């Protein structure tokens, strides 16, 4: 069994696409998953499943949500190991002068093309900073994520892939929860 984390985009935000976490957990338990747990209202689900292609898992989850709630929810899957490795690649954690509560990770469903990465990377977004590495964008938003233009919609448009963002505290908590899975 592999430990996975499903990161859902756009649920329970501003009264849109409301899914109570208990209902989401119950829905996920109808799939061939074990030890399903949710974390906070923004759509983070930890579970165990037989080793499966992440895109297939995401499609199953998204399909179940659509069948039940009649709206589409993008789902991005990472293994527990991938999430931990992501944390280790965050270049902003090496900088001592940054406030860690201003750090975020934007998870991408797919690896964007190098041309699209270069287009985004060659621009200045002061005071915000971003670093694209693989299927993640590491963000530092000193004025807060709510005030940055480096949001999910920005990265989806510029990189041509589905994106969803979590703050550093949430990423660390998901790693911790995955580590305690049996």
Image: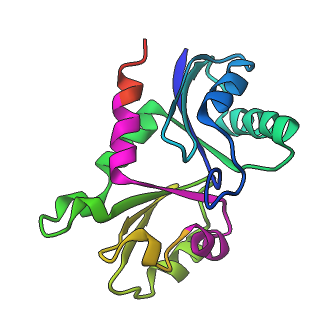
Magenta residue check for 10 = no
Q: Position of residue 48 (x, y in %)?
A: 56, 19
Q: How many dots with numbers?
A: 0
Magenta residue check for 173 = yes
Seen at 61% across and 57% down, the residue is: 13
Q: Is residue 92 left or right of residue 13?
A: left
Magenta span: helix, strand or loop, mainly? helix
Quarter of the figure with residue 102:
bottom left
Q: Where is residue 91 in the image (x, y as percent from the top left)?
A: 28, 61
Q: Where is residue 50 in the image (x, y as percent from the top left)?
A: 63, 17
* Residue 119 to residue 165: above or below: below
Bounds of the magenta segment: 152-176
Q: Quadrant of the C terminus?
A: top left
Seen at 51% across and 79% down, the residue is: 120
* Residue 147 to residue 139: above or below: below
Q: In this view, does 1 lie to the left or right of 27?
A: left
Q: In this view, does 3 lie to the left or right of 102?
A: right
Q: Quadrant of the N terminus?
A: top right
Q: Is residue 36 left or right of residue 61?
A: left
Q: Position of residue 158 (x, y in %)?
A: 62, 76
The structure's colour scheme is rainbow
Seen at 45% across and 78% down, the residue is: 148
Q: Which residue lies furthest to the front in this view?
A: 15
Q: Which residue lies furthest to the top in this view?
A: 182
Q: Residue furthest left?
A: 96
Seen at 66% across and 62% down, the residue is: 161
* Residue 169 to residue 119: above or below: above
């Amino acid at each position: 069994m592999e430990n996975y984390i499903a990161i859902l985009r756009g649920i329970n935000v501003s009264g849109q696409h409301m899914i109570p976490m208990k209902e989401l957990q119950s829905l996920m338990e109808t799939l061939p998953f074990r030890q399903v747990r949710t974390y906070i209202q923004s759509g983070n689900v930890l579970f165990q499943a037989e080793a499966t292609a992440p895109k297939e898992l995401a499609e199953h989850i998204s399909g179940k949500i659509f069948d039940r709630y009649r709206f589409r929810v993008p789902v991005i899957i990472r293994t527990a190991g991938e999430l931990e490795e992501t944390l280790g690649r965050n270049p902003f954690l090496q900088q001592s002068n940054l406030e860690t509560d201003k750090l975020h990770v934007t998870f991408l469903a797919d690896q964007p093309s190098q041309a699209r990465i270069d287009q985004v990377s060659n621009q200045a977004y002061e005071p915000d900073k971003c670093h694209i590495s693989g299927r993640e964008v590491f963000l530092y938003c000193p004025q807060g994520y709510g005030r940055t233009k480096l949001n999910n919609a920005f990265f989806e448009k510029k990189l041509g892939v589905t994106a969803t963002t979590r703050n550093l505290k949430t990423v660390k908590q998901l790693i911790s929860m995955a580590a305690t899975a049996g």
